[in-house]
Image (cartoon, helix red, strand yellow):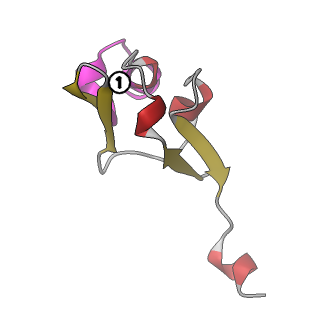
Amino acid sequence: MSWKINVFPEHCTGCRACQMICSYTYENGFQPLKAYITVEEKDSAHFKITFDSRCKNCGLCANYCAIGALVKERQVPLDVQNN
């Protein structure tokens, strides 16, 4: 299933659990630099969260975000929306 991942960077603490689960799942190791999601520190209390083109919208990052910086929302297929 594909999810829409809603990002709330104001909640992010920079723990990078999202990067760890992504890299473990898709790159077979805990290597945050290989994750399909990036958490960048803007300053000591603010972070920027981005997804690269390899992201599969699987929602694992949101499942492992304990503080709600990433929240998944079910995607409704276009053919269902148009009926």
Residue 74's image quarter?
Answer: bottom right
From the viewer's side, name the closer residue of 24 and 68: 68
Residue 33 is left or right of residue 13, and the answer is left
Residue at screen point 56% across, 33% down: 62
Placement of 82 over or under 14, stated as above or below: below
Residue 58 percent location from the top left of the image: 55, 42
Residue 25 percent location from the top left of the image: 47, 24
Is residue 52 at all visible to an observer of this figure?
yes
Disc 1, SS = helix
Residue 2 is left or right of residue 9, and the answer is right
Magenta includes 25?
yes
Q: Point out the stretch of residues depicted in magenta.
A: 19-38
Q: How would you classify the magenta stretch by its main secondary structure?
A: helix
Placement of 26 over or under 83, stated as above or below: above
Residue at screen point 20% across, 25% down: 43
Residue 42's image quarter?
Answer: top left
Is residue 38 at all visible to an observer of this figure?
no
Magenta includes 58?
no
From the viewer's side, name the closer residue of 49 and 3: 49
**Label 1: which residue?**
27
**Can you name the residue that lies furthest to the top here?**
30
Placement of 11 over or under 7, stated as above or below: above
Identify which amino acid the numbered label 1 is placed on.
Answer: Glu
